[in-house]
Amino acid sequence: MERKGGTRKGLVRALVRVGSKSDHRPAVARKGAPGRDQTVCAGCGAVFTGQTWRRSALRLRTAAEHGSVRGTCPACLQTAKGQAFGRVVLEGSYVAGHAEELIRRIRNVAARAEFTQPERRLIEVAARKSTIEVLTTSQKLAHRLAREMVKAFRGSVSYNWSDGDGSLLAVWRRDEEEP
Ligand SMILES: [Zn+2]
């Protein structure tokens, strides 16, 4: 039982949960996977082959040649239902004055991740008064986003993985330096 983070636990609990402890595959992989090769996602065009969803012209062509079926990939299902396994909160006095560049960075990193792994993507980026909240389909993407924030903007980050489904809450913080 992880105790650090205190009140943060409440935020983690707010994430929608699916799956159970007895199934150790990544949550994103078990929800809605059709288990049939050559399934083409109607939402994003990803193709299911060999246990993975990928977006590529080659896969689409191969699927068409082998009699593709239409379906919905897990990430599109999660996005539609707002099921987040990752949440990144950006906070601190630095955030309000730099929201635009922070969000641009988030979107760039996510776009690169989604290109190779379409199941890892943003569900929502919400800019609030002094914080930015990012919901992702996978905890791995949330982890990567938080790391990239530190790389690009310094600051510090704390991670809270939930005991149940492995969903991640990452809180990145940077305060404006005194002049
Ligand atoms: Zn899709």
Image: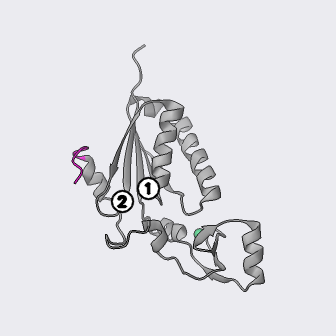
Q: Are marks 1 and 2 in contact (CB under 8 Å)?
A: yes
Is 158 within the magenta? no
- Taking the image in four quarters, ligand 1 sits in the one at bottom right
Q: Is mark 2 within 8 Å of ligand 1?
A: no
Q: Residue at x 41, y 60 (%)?
A: 85
Q: Residue at x 76, y 69 (%)?
A: 58
Q: Is residue 147 above or below residue 174?
A: below
Secondary element type, mark 1: helix
Instruction: Give x and y (percent) for residue 118.
Output: 59, 62
Q: Amino acid at mark 1?
A: Gln
Instruction: Give x and y (percent) for residue 71.
Output: 59, 80
Gap between marks 1 and 2 measured at Cα: 7 Å
The one of 42 and 98 positioned closer to us in this rendering: 42
Secondary element type, mark 2: loop
Q: Is residue 64 visible?
A: yes
Q: Quadrant of the C terminus?
A: top left
Q: For this view, does 69 lie left or right of residue 15?
A: right
Q: Is residue 98 visible?
A: no
Residue 158 is tagged as none
Q: For this view, does 109 lie left or right of residue 1?
A: right
Quarter of the figure with residue 81: bottom left
Instruction: Give x and y (percent) for residue 26.
Output: 44, 65
Q: Residues within 10 Å of mark 2 (few under 14, many from 20)?
A: some
Of pointers 1 and 2, the one earlier in the residue sequence: 1
| Magenta: main secondary structure | loop
Q: Is residue 64 above or below residue 93?
A: below
Would you name the residue on which mark 2 appears? 166
Q: Amino acid at mark 2?
A: Gly
Would you name the residue on which mark 1 appears? 139
Which residues lie in the magenta part?
A: 1-7
Q: Residue at x 31, y 55 (%)?
A: 12
